[in-house]
Image (spheres, rainbow, N blue to C red):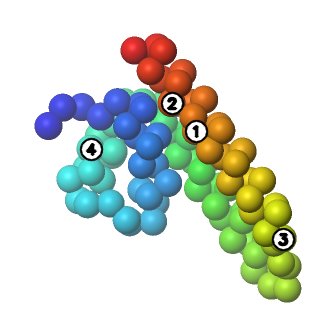
Amino acid sequence: MSAMQCCEFRDIADSFPSDELMRIINHNMLEHLESCAACQRELVVGRNLRERLRAACRNAPDARVRPEFVERLRALLQAAASQSAFRERRTL
């Protein structure tokens, strides 16, 4: 199997820390991380963000998210993902 590229890593990075990936993909991600400082940093940032979100939720169990906020966040994330995908294609 060929070496994993950064764009492939980013596409599945959120599943990596939660053990949601097949063993071969985990191996490829670990192999990629050994040689890619940018993806190492991105993985650390993602882990820190998830931990902070978990802590915030634990400390505020009565907090409710309004549906409008969820929809706006979803739209922003989709727009950001589209822009990122466009940039990746443009640089290839």
The quarter holding residue 62 reads bottom right
Q: Residues within 10 Å of mark 4 (few under 14, many from 20)?
A: some
Q: Residues within 10 Å of mark 3 (few under 14, many from 20)?
A: few
Q: Amino acid at mark 3?
A: Arg
Could you say which is closer to the camera, residue 86 or residue 27? Answer: 86
- Residues tagged 4 and 2 counted as in contact (Cβ below 8 A): no
Could you say which is closer to the camera, residue 59 or residue 10? Answer: 10
In front of the other: label 3 or label 4?
3
* Residue 32 % position (x, y): 34, 36
Q: Amino acid at mark 1?
A: Ala
Residue linked to disc 4 = 28
Q: Earlier in the sequence, mark 4 or mark 2?
A: 4
**Which secondary structure lies at badge 3?**
loop
Q: Amino acid at mark 2?
A: Ala
The numbered mark at residue 85 is 2
In front of the other: label 4 or label 2?
2
Q: Amino acid at mark 4?
A: Asn
